[in-house]
Image (cartoon, coloured by chain):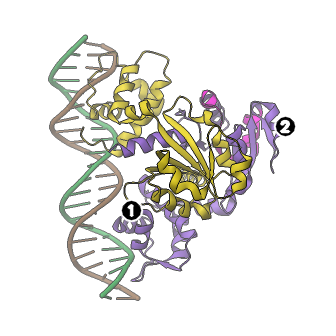
Chain colours: A purple, B yellow, C brown, D green
Amino acid sequence: MAIIPEPTRRRLVQIAHLLSHQKSTRITSMNIESLTGWSSSLIRKDISMIHYNGGVSNGYDVKDLRRAICEALNIAQTIEQGVNCCIVGLGKLGAALLENSIFTGTPFKLVAGFDTNVNRTEILSAPFPLYAASKMESVIPELGIAYAILTVADDNAQRMANILVSSNIKGIVNYTGEILSVPQGVVVENVSPITAMNNLSAMLAE
Amino acid sequence: MAIIPEPTRRRLVQIAHLLSHQKSTRITSMNIESLTGWSSSLIRKDISMIHYNGGVSNGYDVKDLRRAICEALNIAQTIEQGVNCCIVGLGKLGAALLENSIFTGTPFKLVAGFDTNVNRTEILSAPFPLYAASKMESVIPELGIAYAILTVADDNAQRMANILVSSNIKGIVNYTGEILSVPQGVVVENVSPITAMNNLSAMLAE
DNA sequence: CGGTGTGAATGCTTTCACAGCC
DNA sequence: GGCTGTGAAAGCATTCACACCG
């Protein structure tokens, strides 16, 4: 498969998600345009990047298009096997995410939580084990954990990220306000409320 | 001020944030490169977009550069006046964010919370008032709320977004898995853990 | 020197426009 | 007729390379 440019990939991920919530059985690029704001030709181009070629004059088959996108992005495999994830930092935010229901219907499975404060790991309960942060480097490879959700305090973020990296993590969803330095090959997705708000400000100021 | 392209704006927001946490008093574009992974020439180009011209052969003055970026992005004004924000949806995640400490040291101020379930607004306590969701259209303009954090259940997301839009909200930080349809002029920042995870998958699959 | 600031060149993304197909 | 799929054109963003400056 030819390489798919990052902007296209990100849109396809969204489109796939949107398709899974779709009521009707067929959808056109214009429908998707009005749902997402991206131009219909851009959407057609994106779809052409994965060589789908299943569109006809009344659009695409919702289910089939979704399947094709997932396959092309290699999230099909992900979907079948599931991906093991963990939460690092069990403060209020981390604890809120413990609720495993958050990932039901997705391929992501929470299988462990970590906190430096052993109190937290004892007080809280979750449908999977909670460990002291010192256990990360052994537990993460053992359970085959690929992704981590980082919800520690900002001043602890880089230190924990370093441990995650040396535990061989593949990706980090970063809820802290810090920008993490990680080696090539590890992917970080920044979702801190503060960064998000700052982005809003910068977008809205022309 | 000439318009600043979106990718540049997003990087500058991050750089400004990073500068505020900086110990040393001077910094070079190479320093920022090793901190962020963006190339030093890109960083210089970004800075040149705001016509800063304050750099010398030992780099930039950290404080002054930060000030200049904030000014150029119109987040200076934001910083002085603060921006009023609200949380819509007081489930576990929303409740975790109520902790106002999350925005201390930032220009963002939480001034209201909303939930359709009046129980939640009564049970929970916060350093600002919590209202029934039916009050949104009156309270939001009244308090001059510009940004909303959306933490409702997915199947309620678009409905709440519609109400936010008709309450004249400027920006939405979207923690739900839904893609929101909003009119031009309203900005959405998607930070759902599921979207973030999906993006990780798509990035890591070449 | 060591680093900035910036035109020019390169390399991506998006839009356009239209042939082709159901 | 309506919509897809896709070269070709246009529009952006990033890197290069080098003049310039403390």
Task: Locate residue C7 relative to residue A103 in the image: left or right.
Answer: left
Q: Chain of mark 1?
A: A
Q: Which mark is residue B52?
A: none
Q: Position of residue B110 (x, y in %)?
A: 56, 40
Compare marks 2 and 1 and give the one earlier in the sequence: 1
Q: Is residue A133 above or below residue A60?
A: above
Q: Is residue B61 above or below residue B162?
A: above
Looking at the image, which residue is at 37% across and 58% down?
A: B184
> Are callouts 2 and 1 both on one chain?
yes
Q: Position of residue B16 (x, y in %)?
A: 42, 30
The one nearer the camera, A136 or B18, is B18
Can residue B197 be spotted in the picture? Answer: yes
Task: Locate residue D9 relative to residue B200 in the image: left or right.
Answer: left
Specify the amino acid type for callout 1.
Trp
In reply to whether residue A1 is colored magenta, the answer given is: no
* Element type at mark 1: loop
Q: Position of residue A203 (x, y in %)?
A: 38, 45
Specify the amino acid type for callout 2.
Glu
CA neighbours of label 2 inside 10 A, class few (<14), some (14 to 19), many (20+): few
Q: Which residue is mark 2?
A: A122
Q: Which residue is mark 1?
A: A38
